[in-house]
Structures are given as C-alpha cells and as structure tokens.
Image (cartoon, rainbow, N blue to C red):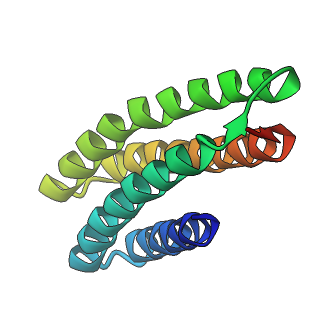
Amino acid sequence: MLTSFVLSLALTVAALAATIWSGVARRRRLHYACVVAHVVLLGFAIRQAELYGRGLVFEGTAGLVKSIHMAGVVVCFALVPVVVVTGVRLARAAAPDRRLWHRRAAWAYVIAVVVTFLLGLAMTLLARPA
C-alpha cells in the first residue's frame, strides 16, 4: 500500500510540474491535458493517502498537524474554481490582466498544494501505527 501511495504522489507531482510548464510555455492543448491528468492523479493520491492513513493513529502533535492539514485541503479545493474561472476567462480573451489573474490564482493553488503536502508528510511521520 505504501508503494502505491508514494507512486501516486510522484505521478501527481509530475503532472503538476507538466501543468505548470505547459501553462508558462503557453501550450494550451497540452496544458488542458496536463490539468486533467493532475486532477485525476490528485484524486487517486488522496484516496491512497486515506487508505494508508487508516493504519495510523493521529494523536497529540500528529492530530494537531492533521487538523491544519485538513484546513489546507479545504483551501486547495476552494482555489480550484478560482483557477478554472480565471483560466477560462484567459482562454476566451488573452488580455494581459487576465493572464496576470490566472497566473496569481494558479501559483496560489500550487503553493497551497505544496504546503498541504508538507503538512500531510509531517502528520504521517508524527503518527504512530494503529
């Protein structure tokens, strides 16, 4: 189970990196495909994390970090519609201000994902086996 969890995380990070690269390079069709791949792989990684986490006990510091991690998850999911809306607006009219807003929203999402990942890693390392 740990192997599939780590593999799903690695693939999710690779898809996120490809999404960033294709967006910066303005390769729109590839960017759309990478976005879809990232979302699907992220869903799979979340499911694998949930399954792996069932074998852990989150008490004390691990429980506190888990609570903060879950708040980070909420922030990530709240940013998704913002990134999508700014991306659709950019695709319809590539004005400089729209590109700026989409870039800001996308980077906010990336930062939130990285922070949430680090919190998830910390809570997992602090947890004890069930």
Q: Quadrant of the C terminus?
A: top right
Is 64 situated left or right of 50 in this image?
right
Q: Is residue 68 visible?
A: yes
Q: Residue at x 73, y 32 (%)?
A: 57
Q: Residue furthest front?
A: 130
Q: Whole-percent x and y of residue 106?
A: 46, 50
| Picture coordinates of residue 26, whole percent (x, y) | 34, 75
Image quadrant for the N terminus?
bottom right
Foreground of the two, 91 or 50: 50
Q: Is residue 79 above or below residue 16?
A: above
Residue extending furthest toward the left? 92
How many numbered discs sit on the rendered protein?
0
Position of 45 with respect to 30 (left or right) is: right
| Residue found 41% across the figure and 78% down from its top | 25
Foreground residue, 98 or 107?
Answer: 107
Is residue 110 something one can see in this rendering?
no
Query: Which residue is pictured at 41% across the width and 35% down the height?
Result: 77
Residue 113 falls left or right of residue 96: right
Residue 128 picture location, percent across and down:
82, 39
